[in-house]
């Protein structure tokens, strides 16, 4: 309480750090006050203000899109969908040309239904849920079209905006 006014009522932009010490601590250390003997009283508890969720990328509102089923972060436009006939580790999955708001883990070799591939797990950047994987390298020539593409499992995404 500086100047006898709670911090929540201070003008915007004014903080305890922008005040001289004797104002920030009120009368406890006014330059005119008598020296204090003994320890200072405990500091007031800090109030943590939570921010609203923000995503790294937002997809256009005019397009049909897919979002994370857990936090609603945008993941992909319907225009980037390549195929709906893929199998993920937990059920059906879609293959996308590009995605947003996802992070990639380290690549590792896995034997999938279509052969040996180097893949990296992908997760939602907002809620950290594992969504599927990215094809880093395909070792069979018939599977090279998958390189650089993304698999997202259906149980981790929802249809969002513009679906009838």
Image (cartoon, rainbow, N blue to C red):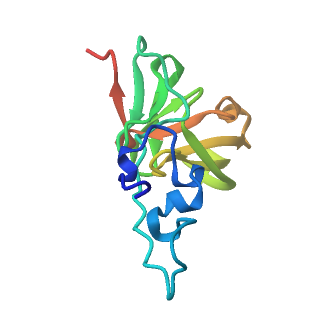
Q: Looking at the picture, how far across and down is residue 8, in whole percent?
A: 36, 48
Q: Nearer the viewer, residue 161 or 116?
A: 161
Q: Residue at x 37, y 56 (%)?
A: 4
Query: In this view, which residue lies farthest toward the bottom?
Result: 38
- State which quarter of the image contains the C terminus: top left
Is residue 138 found left or right of 29 in the rendered image? right
Q: Residue at x 34, y 20 (%)?
A: 161
Q: Residue at x 41, y 56 (%)?
A: 48
Q: Give above or below for 55 relative to 15.
A: above
Is residue 120 found left or right of 4 in the rendered image? right
Q: Give above or below for 36 relative to 46.
A: below
Q: Looking at the picture, how far across and down is residue 81, in whole percent?
A: 50, 23
Q: Residue at x 50, y 85 (%)?
A: 39
Tally of marks: 0
Q: Nearer the viewer, residue 105 or 39?
A: 39
- State which quarter of the image contains the N terminus: bottom left
Is residue 10 found left or right of 144 in the rendered image? left
Q: Quadrant of residue 140?
A: top right
Q: Looking at the picture, how far across and down is residue 73, in whole percent?
A: 43, 36
Q: Nearer the viewer, residue 143 or 153?
A: 153
Query: In this view, which residue lies farthest toward the left?
Result: 164
Is residue 107 found left or right of 4 in the rendered image? right
Q: Looking at the picture, how far across and down is residue 135, in whole percent?
A: 64, 41
């Amino acid at each position: 309480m500086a100047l006898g006014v709670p911090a929540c009522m201070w003008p915007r932009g004014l903080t305890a750090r922008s005040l001289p010490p004797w104002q920030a601590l009120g009368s406890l250390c006014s330059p005119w006050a008598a020296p204090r003997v003994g320890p200072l009283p405990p500091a007031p508890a800090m109030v943590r203000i939570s921010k609203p969720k923000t995503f790294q990328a937002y997809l256009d509102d005019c397009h049909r899109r897919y979002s994370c089923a857990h936090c609603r972060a945008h993941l992909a436009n319907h225009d980037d969908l390549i195929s709906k006939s893929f199998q993920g580790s937990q059920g059906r999955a879609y293959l996308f040309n590009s995605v947003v708001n996802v992070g990639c883990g380290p690549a590792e070799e896995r034997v999938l239904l279509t052969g040996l591939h180097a893949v990296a797990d992908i997760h939602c950047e907002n809620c950290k849920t594992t969504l599927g994987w990215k094809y880093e390298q395909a070792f069979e020539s018939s599977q090279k079209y998958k390189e650089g593409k993304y698999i997202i499992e259906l149980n981790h995404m929802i249809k969002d905006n513009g679906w009838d």
